[in-house]
Structure formats: structure tokens, C-alpha cells
Amino acid sequence: MPLAVGSFLGRVGQLLRESLWPEGDAWNLWSEPRIGSADEQQIESNEVAERLLKEVLGAAHAELVQQGYIDVLSSLSGNTVYRLRIREPIEVYKNGRREAGRLCVVARERVPAADELLVKVLWLRTSEAEFLAIGNRIR
């Protein structure tokens, strides 16, 4: 695993520990489930996901909020840009023009929208060929 990816994954784990377990509590995957309604847990999950998205994207997060999308430059083709929106198929632009088809990649389970978007951004940045092989092309 490249060092940058390992460092990133270490930071993700740290953020999750800090947000899910108060200071002083041990990281324990088998700890008792949190008390509270499913709605409260979903709200908390969404807040944690949004904080992580904001930290990882940095300045690009402000653009995402303002524009409603984030562009990811292709590492395989210098003239291709992937435009990602929350819970929407991915638009593909080549030479500044939108392609007719879009890419669809969704999680098997329901996850916070910010987590889903972050996974797509990181997947495209680190393993674009795999992402393209897995993504469904839709019209």
C-alpha cells in the first residue's frame, strides 16, 4: 500500500475514533451499541461523514458546497474530467464537452451521502481503471 494511502487511511481511522468514541474511551469494535433512535444515529453518521469529507477535500469542499459538484481530473486521459454530484450518476467530460453517457456506481448498503461521494472521489483518484471497469454506463 503506498505511503500516502496508508497515511490517509490512518487519518480516517483517527477521525472515526474521535467522533464515535469520546476521549478516554477505548476503540472497541465489539462495544455495546449506542443508545438512541435510528434517526439520531443517522443524523450523527451524516455529521461524521460530512466532517470527514470536508477535511479530506479541503478547499475543494467549498467548491462542492457552492457549485453542487466536484470535478475529478482523469489520471488516464488528460482531456477527461469526471463531475460528481451527491447521489447522482457521474457525468464524463472530454475536451470540455459532456459525453452522452454517465457512470453509475452505488454502495450495496445505505451509507451517508458524504461517505459515498468521498469514496467515489478517492477511488477515481487512486484506481481509475478499476472504477471504470466496475461502473455501469447509463444514458
Image: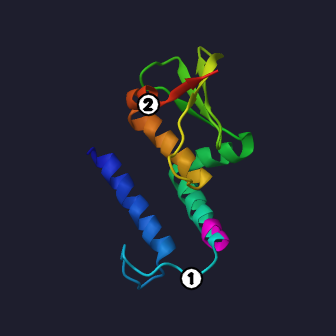
Left or right of 38? Residue 10 is left
Can you name the residue that lies furthest to the bottom here?
24
Mark 1 lies on residue: 35
Is disc 1 placed on a helix, strand or loop?
loop
Which image quadrant: the C terminus?
top right
Mark 2 lies on residue: 134
Name the residue located 37 percent from the left edge and 73 percent from the top edge: 29
Label 1 Cα crowd, 10 Å radius (few <14 / some 14-19 / many 20+): few
Name the residue located 60 percent from the left edge and 44 percent from the top edge: 60
Q: Is residue 12 visible in this depiction of the protein?
A: yes
In the image, 64 versus 16, the foreground residue is 16
Could you say which disc has been placed on residue 97 in the image?
A: none
What is the C-alpha distance between the residues marked 1 and 2?
A: 37 Å
Q: Locate residue 39: give its quadrant.
A: bottom right
* Residue type indicated by callout 1: Ile
- Residue 124 position, x and y percent, is 46, 34
- Mark nearer the N terminus (1 vs 2): 1
* Residue type indicated by callout 2: Ile
Which stretch did the figure color magenta? 39-43
In the image, 124 versus 35, the foreground residue is 35
- Residue 62 position, x and y percent, is 66, 48
- Residue 121 position, x and y percent, is 51, 40
Is disc 2 placed on a helix, strand or loop?
helix
